[in-house]
Image (cartoon, helix red, strand yellow):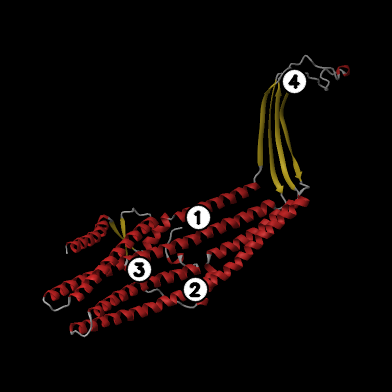
Amino acid sequence: MKHRICKIVTVIAMLAAPAQFVFAQNAKTLSLDEAIQLSIKNSKQLKLSKAKVDEAVANYHDTWNNHLPDVKVTGAYMRLNDPNVDLKVNLSGSSSDTGKKTSSIKVNQAAYGIVNAALPLFSGFRIKYGVESARYLEQATKLDADNDKEEVIQNTINAYSNLYKAKKSVDLVYENLNQQKQRVADFTNMEKNGLLARNDLLKAQLQQSNIELSLLDAENNLKITDINVDLMLGLPEDTEPLPDSSGFQIPGDAGSALHWEQAAIENRKDMAALALREKASVSSIKSTKGEYYPGIALTGGYIAADIPNLLTLTNALNIGVGLQYNLGALWKTGAKVAEAQARLHQVQANEEMLSDEVRVQINQAYQNYILSLKKIDVYASAIDQASENYRITKNKYDNSLVTTTDLLEADVAQLQAKLNYTFSKADALVAYKKLQQTAGTLANTYNIAK
């Protein structure tokens, strides 16, 4: 008897601990829209996506800068030994002095500066198509970020649904536990008065213990879910997020699978990103072929030099047109073009694969949503059936027509029916949002700041 009392005290302590944990937390009621806004704001995945977009934008600007002139400045100051200076220029005006060594000139230092500028006029279209390819890749990266945003939204909806189901599980199991405790108390009085067999009382007490264990599991699951949601939304870990049950209304009409397929073709960001990458690959091929052509640039420069006791050079300006051609491109560029064409074929194959995958995803998400709507109706009927079954079984039990086991089983069936109906509404919302995500329209349903 003493051992049994200790066990009961232990169970009560375990039940009290989660309650104290929840009490110590800061409760915060969150609507689904608020949860999505917080997840978008604090998502590590979206921060990574933004960094990739910034990189693509910088790469585009870097490629576009190839239009601008290159300016190079070179300068040097040198200390010299005592060189032999032999000028071939007649400095004295006498022809007899030409070629005479001017050993009297002492040169021990020299300085010079050169400025060269080159503005590309024609580069075989390498710059033009390189910039075009970079622009397409920049746009594709932005679409990738939008696609990541839809994934973050869907993950938030899943987490919010799990939070709602975990909270409802605790509430329903706790409610059932209170009912079971009252039943055990009634059975205990009946057993003391000789109106109930002790075996029936033990069955009721065993069911109470099982429900207490279920409550422990439900509360533990709720605490873990709370932590996951806090991390996802960027909330302090001592926050107890409370879901708003009004957000779990039965979603809209399913429409037709063909309608959702058409929506996916028009709105899927990953499909649009691949189409842009195909254009980028085509531009890359054209840019690579540009290596077959010479490069023409407008050039200019300025030179200044100072060699004490020998030479001072200033205002040496030059301007002209330069031509550059790599003869090796005649036999090397072909391999580069073939490589670029292979990348294009890969992108085109990925487009075809994604198109098929999208159709499969749409139909799977559509059928799952249809199934979830049917489950709501079935579970709604199951609640009525389970409640009526419990009422009839209770009346029969009161008239000694059924056993205690039958009564307890009817009670469990009633609890399970309530849980199933509650979960089915949450699952229907998740299934509908998954269908929207698959069609690429999920982010459009929320007012999300760019």
Residue extending farthest to the left is 193
Residue tagged 2? 364
Question: How far apart are the alpha carbons under marks 3 and 2?
Answer: 24 Å
Residue 427 seen from this side: yes
Residue extending farthest to the right is 96
Q: Quadrant of the N terminus?
A: bottom left
The residue at the point 36 percent across, 61 percent down is 34
Q: What amino acid is at disc 1?
A: Ser
Question: How far apart are the alpha carbons under marks 3 and 1?
Answer: 29 Å
Q: Quadrant of residue 370?
A: bottom left
Residue 361 locus on image (x, y percent): 51, 71
Height in image: 211 above or below 93?
Answer: below
Dot 1 lies on which element?
helix
Position of 257 compared to 74: left or right?
left
The tag on residue 310 is: 4
The numbered mark, 2 or 1, whose residue comes first in the sequence reads: 1
CB-based contact (under 8 Å), mark 4 and mark 2 = no
Q: Nearer the viewer, residue 291 or 382?
A: 382
Residue tagged 1? 49
Of tags 4 and 3, the one toward the viewer is 3
Q: Quadrant of residue 275?
A: bottom right
Height in image: 120 above or below 138?
Answer: above
Q: What amino acid is at disc 2?
A: Gln
The numbered mark, 4 or 3, whose residue comes first in the sequence reads: 3
Q: What amino acid is at disc 3?
A: Gly
Near mark 3 (Cα within 10 A), the count class, few <14, some 14-19 or many ≥20, is some
